[in-house]
Image (tube, helix red, strand yellow):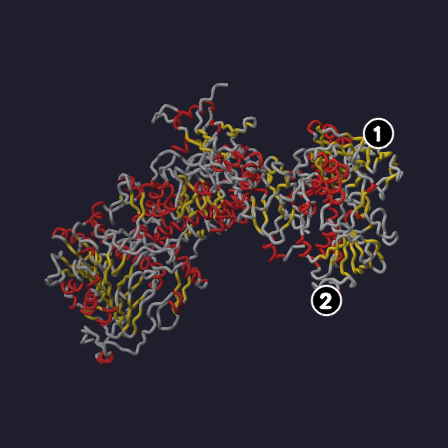
Amino acid sequence: MKRIYIQEEYCIGCRLCEIYCQVKHSKSKKIIKAFKEEMVDILPRVLVEEIGYNSFAIQCRHCSDAPCVEACISGAMQKNKNTGVVTCNEDKCVGCWSCIMVCPYGVIKRDLSGKKIASKCDLCIDEEIPVCVQNCPNEALKFMDKDAKEKNLVGNKGG
Amino acid sequence: MNGINNINKNNKDTQEYFSRFRIPSGCAVFGIVNEARERFSGQMVMDGISVMHERSNGLGGGFAAYGIYPEFKDDRAFHILYDDAEAKRQTEDEIALSFKILFSEEIPTTKISGIVNPPMIYRYFLKSKGNGDTFTTEEDLIVDFIMHVNRDIRGAFVVSSGKNMGIFKGVGFPEDIGRFFKLDQYKGYLWTSHGRFPTNSAGWWGGAHPFGLLDWSVVHNGEISSFGTNKRFVSGFGYECTLSTDTEVITYLLDLLVRKQKIDIELIHLVLASPLWEEIERMPEDNREILKSLRILYGSALLNGPFSIIVGSGNFMYALNDRIKLRPLVAARKGEYLFISSEEAPIRKVCVSPDRLWHPDGGEPVIGIVRKEEIKKDMKSAQATQIDEKPERLVKIGIVSLNKSQGDLNGFKIKAI
Amino acid sequence: MKSKNNNRKNNKTFEDNETIDYLIIGNSAAGLAAAESIRELDRAGEIIILTAENYLNYSKPMITYFLAGAVNLDMIHFKDEKFYTDNRLDIRLNTRVKSIDTNKMFLITDDGKRYEFRKLLIASGGRPIIPKIKVVGAGSFDFIDGTNYEKVGGIFTLTNLEDAIRVKNYIEKNDIKNISILGGGLIGLKAAEAFLEKGIDINIIELADRILATTFDREASGIIERKIKSAGSNIYRNNTIEEIYIESGKITGYKLKDGRKMECSLLIIAVGVNPDASFIESGSLDMVKGIIVDDHMRTSVKNIYAAGDVVEGPDMLSGGKRNIAIWPLAVRQGTAAGVNMAGRNKRYGGGFFMNSVELLGIPSISMGITNIGEEAEGIEVLRDFDADRNMYRKVIIKNNRIIGVILIGNIERAGIYSGLIRNEIDISSVKENISREDFGIIHLPTDYKKHLVVGEGIEV
Amino acid sequence: MALKLKQSEFEIERDQNKCISCEVCVRQCSNDVHEYDSDQDTIYSDNSKCVGCRRCEALCPTGALKIRNREDQFKTNYNWTSSHLNNIYRQADSGGVLLTGMGSDRPYTIYWDHILFNASQVTNPSIDPLREPMEIRTFIGRKPDGLEFEMKKNKGSKEGLKNTNIRLKTRLSPQLDLSTPIMFSAMSYGSISFNACRSLAAAASEFGTYCNTGEGGMHKDLYKYANNTIVQVASGRYGVDTDYLNKGAAIEIKIGQGAKPGIGGHLPGEKVTEDISNTRMIPEGTDAISPAPHHDIYSIEDLAQLIYALKEATNWSKPVGVKVSAVHNIAPIASGVVRAGADFVTIDGLRGGTGAAPQTIRDNVGIPIELAIASVDERLREEGIRHRSSIIAAGSIRSSADVIKAIALGADAVYIGTAALVAMGCHLCQKCYTGKCNWGIATQDPYLTKRLNPEIGTRKLLNLLRGWSLEIKEMLGGAGINAIESLKSNREHLRGISLNDRELAILGIKHAGEAW
């Protein structure tokens, strides 16, 4: 399954990934409109951490043994069997934040704009390439299937 | 020092004057050599070249003939064109300085309707006084002398300067030039000819092919797109391109590579039409080294652009096509005879059924080497004007002995080594 | 090892008298997690799930959200109908287990039916504790306890969906404005969360000196208590109910230990939960309060497993066995049990206490061992307390490992701490950053950071 | 403090309708031009600090930014242009030498733009590079005066090569084997970032051409590209030892550089990080000032000695060349250098780039590369030694057409420096000497160097080489040539346009409109 990987040494801390993620998850999907009108409500699903010249963008890893799916009391957080993408069903989520409690990457956020729901990366399933990867000016973010490469090297790594 | 005004050595107007004649031309080439050094009449080559009448437009034609002056075999035969007596006088003074004139005469010609106001055409048989110093050879002296005459004496042009050979050329169809110079009465073992198709009007006797220097004669069909590079390459070795015509630079390249650099004639095609890198990469190791070295050193001697040339010299006729064969070239063998032509028809005209006829590949040379020894037999009926269909008839009259198998000296592909 | 009889029974309906490959007691987090992982490894084995309740399935922590109106009945399930059909799980509702014969490997249900099994999973979860309280004025009985509290109108527990529905109806029917909750622990506060959400005032009666005593320390509880008080509800600490007044079958009030008399028309008993293992004959299985299991969820009897709120399983932090009745551990234990029951091998790496609750808009997360302070030996505590912004952050460290965290107000990225605890990461090199408000992965020790940033994500 | 009179060169226009205050520009500008004001949620910009590198313009997600050259700095004056005024203001403040980066930006005649190339029509066919082989493989190095063969003909009567074994007696001296007549010019690790060096080295080795270490020595992580690296020996001898000499594919003695003929190099101390000090073998933080003349080369014979010393040191296994800047006597100088034994002569023209050079020298010293090549090629021909060594033209080759013209004027191959930097993102703001290059190229600041991802850098350079090579093949084919050798100093294929006779004469080309 294709996943997002980062090469820390090339992340320049410009945060364009966050901006385009916000646009992608805005209503209008238009950058100026999204920021000028919906600004307050759109949460980026990718997070850039930066100290001095070290920085990296991090988002949900869609773990194969996802703690958030385990901890979700409402069945909102599900891992799709074939795409492998972990998504939060906004109708079922009650905002109990258990997923935030267990996600070791700390990449799930509280979306308080409307009904309290958990907000996380959905791997831009409807896009060829996730918008954060598409818009990284330095190709620090990559979208590839490491298993596929390693599959022929190492054999199936799945549990 | 490196003053701006003598950037290009020759004075401006001559280069200007001659360069107008570097006319891109499509043309016809035709050559015959008898490897047994048996001499035959010029009629055969005239018949051949006339078939390709369409390939020329009457603004240039010429012949090179080897073996026509047996009596002056070891002396220099100069053919010189003069516009006027003054040019003749000046030139003859210069000749007198460096050479002893054994015999000189106006080259006999007949009036031909196709030939209009020909210049004065003289030939001189000379012995060089050998007053060059130890370093420069006799040939170098002659080359300098010719360049001096062609460049500095207005109205004089040395057409050929070889031994036991001569070049007859001018403005007109080749067959007319042949008849004008009565070449049917000459007998030689190697003839090349050329019909020119320059694309603008300025016909000039000196500009016709073949181009001669020492024993070399070159006829050429095509246009050398690497002319500038080749010209500068030879200029680095003292050759001054006065006419800046393709044939001139090809001749100087040949003289430089064969005479001065002493590269064997059988390797010359590896320089003038060097194989492509992709071919070189596929060759065995030692060949690859040779070709890489040739290409590294003589890259600027590579003739690029379409050409098919026939080179005459004292003891071989050499024909070569450009390496991607953008110009036609056909070769044929009949006993001791090797024919080279732009088209097959002229060969069939003079030799109906050759032993072998083939189209050499791009970059594949055809060499006819004339054997040293004279054929003792006196050939009474040397008038092999027409080799008719039945080869046996030829055998009877003793011109051609079929038993010797010339077989595969049809030129060679370097791949074959 | 594939179970022997899988070829015969492919998808035939099960007759009752045959031996069942996998029998699961309990239809909640642990039971269904086990069922799913068994089916994944054993395509053919027959699985039967018994539940005393009458609902397809629901998640216990969700009942307070139901009570608060945040979710309705048809959305409360966390596994839909398709889950059962896809995985060919035979669910038997209203089937309470009466007794289990752990030698002959069969059990009897209330309706007298007998189920023989090859492998059994006990995932019956927990049962509310009902303290014995003196009753005044009812006439028919002089105290209430676990057996008779349901007969009194207005007294409820709140541990299953049935309770929540009855409370919800009772509130609507009697237009209740004030509710008393006996017990200021997790369940009590969860209930309080629901009622506050509906705008009903609450009185919380807590035995200890503060609410959520097991998970919060004084400062943390202080923040929540102040908030609840400011919302017009009150909390009675170091207190309990001594007497209950009942008139015409309904509760009307009660008397506190400190003597105060209170009016009350609805009392929620939420003093705690015990493993629901009454149907297990003592001595047939190693038990204390819960069923003792090893790190493969095996009980003391071969082929009998247990998982979820009913067990006392390996506790990562204390090293011993403890009953940690929380949802994530129930799911993980269920999965482990399922894999082991299906003949494969999966170790349950032990768990630790975690809880996330949001009260009156203040989110709070606590995990691990939280209510010890510097005074304890070898303990180091990092604190960041901003009372007026209701922000509190406490990280408890023991020999360079985090063993407990409390976050009030700002729970951003709390999971990073749970990752640190779970992976037992040595944080000595980054101690100064641990309690920062913007604590992030970039502050983590380099190797662990590298793994998270560049790594694949958590593999099995 | 006295008022600083220098006008700001640029004006930043921010379209408030488009600006979403995302602060990308604030974070990306190393000159702190942009600043976010949180109470007003707007971003303000300080024109005076802007160097016009257009990083913010490029990364602004909504295209809200426009950086304008300020034309209206002073009253129009064709003599006292704004650059003269600003220079004097700066110098009146600093009292020092005014430094600048890149090549001269003065409007001297750009001869490339006054030369037109030929094409075949009718009389000879052009060659289609898509169908016919088109050879642009180039060899750089010393060539002998002739080749000697030993032809032993086997006994058989037949002539022809089939039965002759030929042995080449002359051994050719080592050559550089380029897959395209384009190499990356000398840019030292120190003036440009490690990522930039790595991109150049990786692209050179993958494409089959060469990069040049410049004066900065070779970083050990780039040893794996050593077979495609020309190592430079400059007057400062930075990073030079036998290991370094033996590592490279060729050695280039740097006598001069087009942007600063006659003066040495200057790498400011703050750019000399620990990594660079190891590579250059100089103490960290010290200014790396390479002296103007090599202190062991005061005349041509010293150069000859150094060339042979280097050849001995590398036991004659690789070409040793000399890089000189194009000055007035470049023709006799080049002739001397060839006779001194140099296997190739790099000539760096007036517009050649630099990391740091005094502006007045960069803009007023040296001659354009086009005239330099033409006169050197002509002079070496006259002396009959043109074939002995290769000429490499450097100094503002901006397109494949420039390459074609350079070769037609007499060069064997070209070096590209600025063009390579531009491919990696450079916007020619000419501020390399500040070490604050926002594109991560001419800087050692780790916050900035990360901005050049070498994977991208390499890919872009490969694309540039590939693009130019394809175009060169197209133009060669158009002129009926299928081997680059036939283009070298083939001035018959060039025509001048709006050039005077002297310029045409020097270039050795006819004016457009003149036939053969």
Chain letter belonging to callout 1: C
Q: At x 15% / y 58%, what residue is drawn? A: B122
Cα separation, mark 2 vs mark 1, equals 67 Å
Q: Residues within 10 Å of mark 2 (few under 14, many from 20)?
A: few
Q: Which amino acid does label 1 sit on?
A: Lys
Q: Can residue D1 be seen in this view?
A: yes
- Residue that protrudes farthest toward the front in the picture: C248
Q: Can residue B3 be seen in this view?
A: no
The numbered dot on residue C424 is none
Q: How crowded is mark 1: few (under 14 residues within 10 Å), some or many (20 or more)?
A: some
The picture quadrant where one finds residue B366 is bottom left
Q: Which of marks 2 and 1 is nearer the N terminus?
A: 2
Q: At x 81% / y 51%, what residue is drawn? A: C293
Image depth: mark 2 or mark 1 in front: 1
Q: At x 22% / y 57%, what residue is drawn? A: B128
Q: Position of residue A96 (x, y in %)?
A: 69, 40
State the residue position of label 2: C8
Q: Position of residue B282 (x, y in %)?
A: 44, 62
**Regarding mark 2 in the picture, which secondary structure is present there?**
loop
State the residue position of label 1: C261
Chain letter belonging to callout 2: C
Closest to the observer, D223 or D474: D474
Relative side of D62 to B264, left or right: right
Q: Where is residue A80 in the image (x, y as percent from the top left)?
A: 62, 51
**Regarding mark 1 in the picture, which secondary structure is present there?**
strand
Asked if the residue under mark 1 is in contact with the one under mark 2, i.e. CB atoms within 8 Å, the reply is no
Q: What residue type is labelled 2?
A: Arg
Closest to the observer, B109 or C214: C214
Please determine whether, in this image, residue C176 is positioned above or below residue B155. Answer: above
Please determine whether, in this image, residue D33 is positioned above or below residue D240. Answer: above
Q: Where is residue C171 in the image (x, y as percent from the top left)?
A: 74, 37
